[in-house]
Image (cartoon, rainbow, N blue to C red):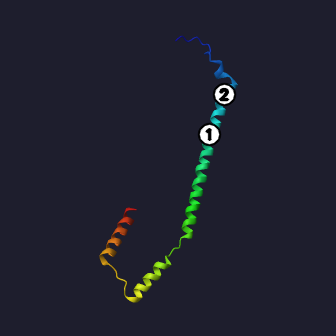
Amino acid sequence: MKITGHKPTQAPELNSGKARDAQRGEGQSRSGEARDSASTVRKDKTLITHRIREAVDSTPDVRADRVAELRKQIASGEYRIDPDRLAENMLRESLREDIE
């Protein structure tokens, strides 16, 4: 390579304003598409969250039918506690809490 002190020659299409504008336009449309896509994803997540919240809000905190049945069994003396099952469930829940 010979160094002459002259400016290197560049291809005219790279120096033209049209080429720069075209490149800028492509970048802007791509970033615009990305923005639109991100906006769509955000809207979808918001909609899903809203639907989940509605489902949770419409579900009663207490199953009244099950509570009534248990009260009836307790009052009649029919309700029995399985100590092994109770202990197993307590241990399982305790381990689950420790892991989380």
Judge the density around disc 1: few (<14), some (14-19), many (≥20) Cα neighbours within 10 Å. few
Q: What is the C-alpha distance between the residues marked 1 and 2?
A: 17 Å
Residue 64, horizontal then vertical, whole percent: 50, 79
- When the figure is inspected, residue 80 is found, relative to residue 98, above or below; the finding is below
Does dot 1 land on a helix, a strand or a loop?
helix
Q: Quadrant of residue 35?
A: top right
What residue is shown at x 44% (from left), y 82% (from top)? 69
The C terminus lies in which quarter of the figure? bottom left
Residue 67, horizontal then vertical, whole percent: 46, 80
Tell me the tag on residue 67: none
Indicate left or right for 81 with 40 as reference: left
Residue 17, horizontal then vertical, whole percent: 69, 25
Residue 44, horizontal then vertical, whole percent: 59, 53
Residue position for label 2 = 20
Indicate left or right for 81 with 70 as reference: left
Does dot 2 land on a helix, a strand or a loop?
helix
Q: Name the foreground residue: 64 vs 84.
A: 64
Residue position for label 1 = 31
Judge the density around disc 2: few (<14), some (14-19), many (≥20) Cα neighbours within 10 Å. few
Q: Name the foreground residue: 82 vs 7.
A: 82
Q: Quadrant of residue 16?
A: top right
What residue is shown at x 41% (from left), y 88% (from top)? 75
| Amino acid type, label 2 | Arg
